[in-house]
Image (cartoon, grey):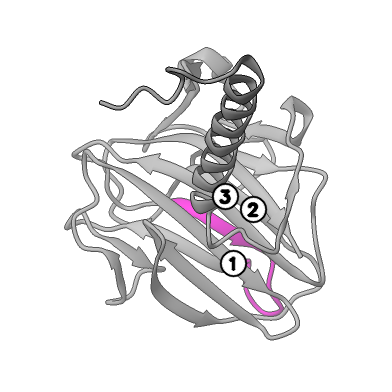
Amino acid sequence: MMNLFSSRSPATKLLLMIMLQFIAIHETMASKSYHIDPLTRGFHSIPLNKSNLVLQRPYNVPENERYSFIDGVQKLWVLKSDKPHSPTSRTSPRTEIRIHGYDYSSDVWQFEGYFYVPHGTKGVSIMQVFGAAKHATTLMLIVNENGALTYYRTNIVIVPHVYDKWFKLNVIHDVEKTRVRVYINDRLKYEAPGRGGKSHYFKYGVYSNRDASSCMESRWKKVGIFRK
């Protein structure tokens, strides 16, 4: 291999070293820019801290019996026989994170996260866009009895086989255009109409639905919120 520095003057060697360092820095920056997430390009990242992640769980059960956070992974589970999240609630059992402090009524908002559903979990919503005009929600993603992830309890399949794998999920809600787009691993899987409503927020975890398994669980990591 040719030695660029042999028989060169000290000044020339210094110039060559500076040029090589410049090229290395440029290639590094280009590599990083190449890996910018195309779905979040043009959005502003919203800071999330512990106060923004409000845990809703059966009111009579300690937090550590339905939720854990280890090595960057949130694990949320609930039993079909559990109580609701408050003594006065008549809703189904849940262990969910409710994004607090970022309720929205305009603009375009995006939820991003990686999720994992263990085999056997069924009859449960794992992610919601809460708020609608004539309904409680604008979007629910449900694991059905066949282990598929569906749009509500319909035949619209988002992921045919959801068990025991990590998936990247992006949900983009355009309030003005009343449109919700669902992406799995950066691919558009479904575009749904909005359902109106004056206020919305994101939720993820497990919320018991019809034909639920005795225990329901989902795991999450790298959850983020974006706006434009």
Camera-nearest residue between 5 and 31: 5
Give the amino acid at mark 3.
Ser
Position of residue 129 measured from the top left corner of the image (x, y, whole percent) = 60, 61
The residue that disc 3 covers is 33
Query: Is the residue 174 above or below the residue 125 in the image?
Result: below
What's the CA distance linking mark 2 and mark 1? 11 Å
Mark 2 surroundings within 10 Å by alpha-carbon count, few (fewer than 14), some (14 through 19), many (20 or more): many
What residue sits right under mark 2 in the picture? 202
The CA distance from mark 3 to mark 2 is 28 Å
Closer to the chain start, of discs 1 and 3, is 3
Spatial CA distance of label 1 from label 3 is 22 Å
Q: Residue at x 46, y 16 (%)?
A: 71
Q: Is residue 169 rendered to the left or right of residue 13?
A: left
**Percent position (x, y) of residue 160?**
20, 62
Which of the marked residues, 2 or 1, is nearer the chain's N terminus? 1
Name the residue nearer the viewer: 24 or 102.
Answer: 24
Total numbered labels: 3
For label 1, the SS is: strand
State whether residue 220 is above or below residue 150.
above
Q: Amino acid at mark 2?
A: Phe
Residue carrying label 1: 172
Amino acid at circle 1: Ile
Name which of mark 3 and mark 2 comes first in the sequence.
3
Contact? badges 1 and 3 (CB < 8 Å): no
Is residue 49 depicted above or below 99 in this figure?
A: above
Q: Is residue 92 visible?
A: no
| Tag in front: 1 or 3 | 3
What is the magenta range?
126-137
Residue in the picture at 42% in, 32% down: 78
